[in-house]
Amino acid sequence: MDEVVRKVAALGLPGIILVVTMATTGLAGAAAITAALAFLGPGGILGGIALLGVTGLITDALTKVGIEQFLLNIYQHRSKTEARSALLREIDRLPISKDLARSLKDNLS
């Protein structure tokens, strides 16, 4: 059951993004879908489809491990090739809670 919930959540976010973008176009029907996909994607409609697919993959990963572990894994991997001071400054600029930022910094230090 948990796997089904994760898959539905992963499919849900790209759908929400598409519907909200379609609503902002001021168009209806196929024209709204076309305009929304072209707006979302770098490189037009195909880029929009790719962006929604990547969003689904990221959402699926987040539902499996949680945002804190997901970010921690990313920053630990990046710390192998990038300066820790630069990563710590980047964490300060992220739109996340102070507790999450503190946890990420503690685990990197």
Image: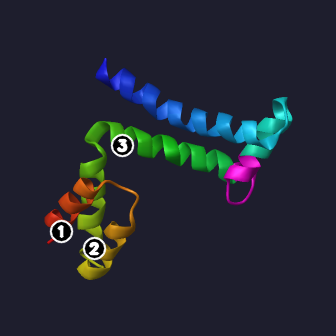
Label 1 to label 2, Cα distance in Å? Answer: 8 Å
Kind of residue at disc 2: Leu
Residue 106 horizontal/vertical position (percent): 14, 65
In the rendered view, tell whether residue 98 sits above or below residue 25.
Answer: below
Q: Which residues are magenta?
A: 37-46
Residue ID for mark 1: 108
x 75%, y 50%: residue: 38
Residue ID for mark 3: 61
For the point 32% across and 67% down, the residue is 91
Task: Say if the magenta span includes residue 17.
Answer: no
For disc 3, the neighbor class at 10 Å (few under 14, some 14 to 19, many from 20) is some
- Which residue: 19% across, 58% down? 103
**What is the chief secondary structure element of the magenta stretch?**
helix
Return the residue at label 2: 88
Task: Name the side, left or right, on which 34 lies relative to 72.
Answer: right
Whole-angstrom CA distance, mark 2 to mark 3, is: 23 Å
Q: Per the image, is 38 magenta?
A: yes
Q: Using the rendered view, name the quadrant where residue 84 is placed.
A: bottom left
Which quadrant would the C terminus be assigned to in this image?
bottom left
Q: Is residue 70 left or right of residue 95?
A: left
Number of the front mark, 3 or 1: 1
Secondary element type, mark 3: helix
Q: CA distance from mark 3 to mark 1?
A: 21 Å
Q: Secondary structure at mark 2?
A: helix
> Where's residue 15, x and y in %?
59, 33
Q: Are marks 1 and 2 in contact (CB under 8 Å)?
A: yes
**Looking at this view, is 58 or 88 the one in front?**
88
Ranked by sequence position, the earlier of labels 3 and 1 is 3
Disc 1, SS: helix
Residue 83 appears in the figure? no
